Amino acid sequence: MAKIAIVYFSGYGHTARLAGAVEQGAAAVAGANVEIFRIDANGDLPDGALEKLATVDAIIYGSPTYMGGPAWQFKKFADASSKAWFTQAWKDKVAAGFTNSASVNGDKAATISYFVTLAMQHGQIWVGTGLMPSNRKEHGPDDVNWTAGQTGLLAISPSDASAEEAPRKGDLETARLFGKRVAEVAAKLRD
């Protein structure tokens, strides 16, 4: 049974909705056990979360992209993970990441790069989306991987959209497929 953890921050609910879709996809893999750890508004994880992360097979990182990078609440978690780094507690665990912002680009790649660097600091094994982009004239926000995320999952939530309206169905389906892929890779490496 592969154990998957999703660690994320969400400021307005959009990234939480994305995390839920990633969870659905990961949980769809036979034998996968998925646990979500939401970083609160003060940048803190639930009690015992850092210790639990040492017991999982994969950690999926998530944060909205604010001002060209992850939210400060996520960075506080990343800094707190230095104790796990010191003991190499997350070494050889699968890692992946997702982000969300209002714009089509919005410098989301910088947030994903931050996650990759964090994972490499911990000696983790990075998994990208594995999805082809929907990049033809007939494609749009309702299609899978319309944002063309390869290294990580990229989603768009327009600035005037509620968390019920965005991310849109294409991004949510992309998130489910991404979660499923991460869980499948974790299960293969566990065997």
Image (cartoon, rainbow, N blue to C red):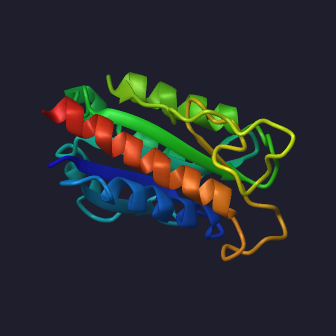
Relative placement, left or right, of 83 versus 136 is left
Q: Residue furthest front?
A: 138
Instruction: Tell me the quarter of the picture where residue 133 sits.
Output: top right
Relative placement, left or right, of 121 versus 98 is left
Q: Position of residue 7 (x, y in %)?
A: 41, 53
Residue at the spot 73% in from the left edge and 52% down from the top edge:
101
So how many labels did they put on this image? 0
| Front residue of 15 and 66 | 15
Residue at the spot 56% in from the left edge and 56% down from the top edge:
173
Q: Is residue 83 visible?
A: no
Q: Is residue 66 visible?
A: yes
Instruction: Tell me the quarter of the picture where residue 142 sits.
Output: bottom right
Q: Position of residue 71 (x, y in %)?
A: 62, 50
With respect to residue 24, does 175 lie above or below? Answer: above
Q: Position of residue 174 (x, y in %)?
A: 57, 50
Relative placement, left or right, of 178 versus 104 is left
Residue at the spot 76% in from the left edge and 54% down from the top edge:
141
| Front residue of 120 and 178 | 178
Q: Position of residue 102 (x, y in %)?
A: 79, 55
| Front residue of 180 and 82 | 180
Location of the C terminus by quadrant is top left
Instruction: Tell me the quarter of the picture where residue 30 sits.
Output: bottom left
